[in-house]
Structures are given as structure tokens and as C-alpha cells.
């Protein structure tokens, strides 16, 4: 059987990523959707008076800000290209830092940008951006605008992971990587396509036969790494047939 693609990313990122895969060789493989996190509104937007820069480390922060405020005059630093694009589509001027939180902090320092800055994030964050900025002498604060609630895998997703055909599972955060295989005894040859090394490290040891880490920690990097993940899946399929 051909490999199956298991998409665990919540919307709207899931559909965008799937659309990008469909234009690539192997992107038309059988596909199962089963988000492992639900994005839910939480918290409120603080007073924006005096804020010089917004900081977004995910597109979900952008979407919530756009829902809560009509302000589009405050420029933003975005952790990566996908988040920057979401901000620009919402009518904001956004600078992509094309990486992770470390790249974002380095870009802010290189630009000599000054605060006050406001980091709009979810309940779970990969890094304390506001704390790091404050330690560097930049006035910064944060606001939690959404929560990431765990979701159980669908029956179809469980069937994939406990079957015998290869599975390619893209994971877009350390938390989703950990949630993907929680409570499951994986029997399928599994290829993890991880957005970052931090995400890859959250996959239980021995659960995957191969792990491809994107060279750039965003959706663009994931798409670029897709051919390597696909090649690994077909290699595993060939090994199975040989056995």
C-alpha cells in the first residue's frame, strides 16, 4: 500500500499546507486529517496605547488580534513567513524573521527596535519572548489570546498509526508532536516531518523509523522538506516488501 499522509495541524493552517503539498510530487497520496490541538479564544486584548511593535509567534495570534481590534497601524515582527503573510493579509505591516524565537529576538536586536512591544501568544509558548526582550533592556509585555486544547486522534488516524502501511506525519510544534502519539502503540512505519528540532525531540524515541527536520522552522521549510520525507516513506515501503 502507498504511504498515507496524516495531518494533525488545526485549521486554517491544515488546508493551506495540504494545498501546498498537492502541487508537489507525492502530494496526492491518501490523506487523513485529525487535529491534535483545538485553538480556542481566551483572554482579552490589553490597552494598545503607546505600543510601538506587536510580536506574533503564530498565525493564530494574528487571527485573534484581527478579531479583537481594528488597529492596523502598529507594525509587527512575525516569527516566520507564514505568520508574516497572515499579518499582511489582515492589513498590517509585518517583518518576517524567517525562523524561530531566537531568530526573532536576533532580528529585533539587529534592527535596534525599541519598545514598548507586545507579544500576542497562546497559553503554551515555545519561548519567553517578552522576558528575553525585557532582559535585553527593551520594554515588552505579553497577552494570551488563545488556548491550545488537546484533541484525541480520530479512529481513522489511529488505524493509520496501528496499521502496516507507511505514514508521513508532519508536526508543526513540540506540543503537537508530543500529542500525536500519546497512548498509541505505533506499528506502522512512521516518518515524522518536523518543523524544528525541538518538535522532533518531543516524538517518543523508537516511535518513528525516520525523522526529517525542516531546514527553516515554518510552513515554507516544511514544504521544502517534503521530498525527503516522501523518499523515506517509499524507502520504508520497499523494505517492507523485501521482508
Image (cartoon, helix red, strand yellow):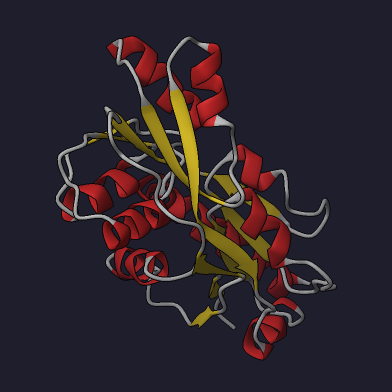
Residue 47 figure quarter: top left
Q: Quadrant of the C terminus?
A: bottom right
**28 relative to 230, above or below:** below
**Residue 79 appears anywhere in the view:** yes
Identify the residue at the far bottom of this view.
155
**14 relative to 223, above or below:** below
Disc tally is: 0
Q: Quadrant of the N terminus?
A: bottom right
Residue 80 is situated, as x and y percent measured from the top left of the image, at: 36, 40
Front-lying residue, 113 or 2: 113
Residue 188 is situated, as x and y percent measured from the top left of the image, at: 73, 73
Residue drawn at point x = 30 percent, y = 10 percent: 112
**Residue 103 appears anywhere in the view:** no
Front-lying residue, 206 or 195: 195
Residue 228 is situated, as x and y percent measured from the top left of the image, at: 49, 51
Residue drawn at point x = 80 percent, y = 54 percent: 204
Answer with left or right where residue 236 lies relative to residue 231: right
Residue 62 is situated, as x and y percent measured from the top left of the image, at: 33, 52
Residue drawn at point x = 45 percent, y = 77 percent: 29
**118 relative to 189, above or below:** above
Front-lying residue, 194 or 144: 144
Amino acid at each position: 500500500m502507498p504511504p498515507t499522509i496524516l495531518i494533525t495541524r488545526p485549521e486554517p493552517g491544515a488546508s493551506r499546507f495540504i494545498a501546498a503539498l498537492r502541487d508537489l510530487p507525492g502530494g496526492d497520496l491518501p490523506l487523513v486529517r485529525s487535529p491534535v490541538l483545538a485553538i480556542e479564544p481566551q483572554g482579552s486584548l490589553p490597552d494598545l496605547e503607546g505600543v510601538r511593535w506587536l510580536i506574533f509567534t503564530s498565525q493564530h495570534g494574528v487571527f485573534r488580534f484581527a478579531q479583537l481590534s481594528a488597529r492596523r497601524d502598529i507594525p509587527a515582527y512575525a516569527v516566520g513567513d507564514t505568520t508574516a503573510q497572515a499579518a499582511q493579509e489582515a492589513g498590517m505591516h509585518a517583518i518576517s524573521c524567517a525562523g524561530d524565537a531566537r531568530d526573532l529576538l536576533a532580528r529585533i536586536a539587529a534592527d535596534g527596535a525599541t519598545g514598548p512591544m507586545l507579544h500576542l501568544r497562546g497559553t503554551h509558548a515555545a519561548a519567553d519572548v517578552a522576558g528575553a526582550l525585557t532582559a535585553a533592556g527593551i520594554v515588552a509585555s505579553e497577552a494570551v489570546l488563545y488556548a491550545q486544547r488537546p484533541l484525541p486522534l480520530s479512529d481513522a488516524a489511529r488505524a493509520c498509526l496501528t496499521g502496516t502501511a507507511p505514514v508521513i506525519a508532519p508536526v508543526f510544534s513540540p506540543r503537537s508532536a508530543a500529542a500525536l502519539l500519546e497512548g498509541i502503540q505505533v506499528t506502522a512505519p512512521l516518518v515524522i516531518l518536523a518543523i524544528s528540532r525541538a518538535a522532533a525531540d518531543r516524538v517518543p524515541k523508537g516511535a518513528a523509523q525516520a525523522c526529517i527536520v525542516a531546514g527553516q522552522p515554518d510552513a515554507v521549510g516544511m514544504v521544502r522538506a517534503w521530498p525527503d520525507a516522501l523518499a523515506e516513506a517509499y524507502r520504508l515501503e520497499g523494505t517492507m516488501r523485501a521482508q
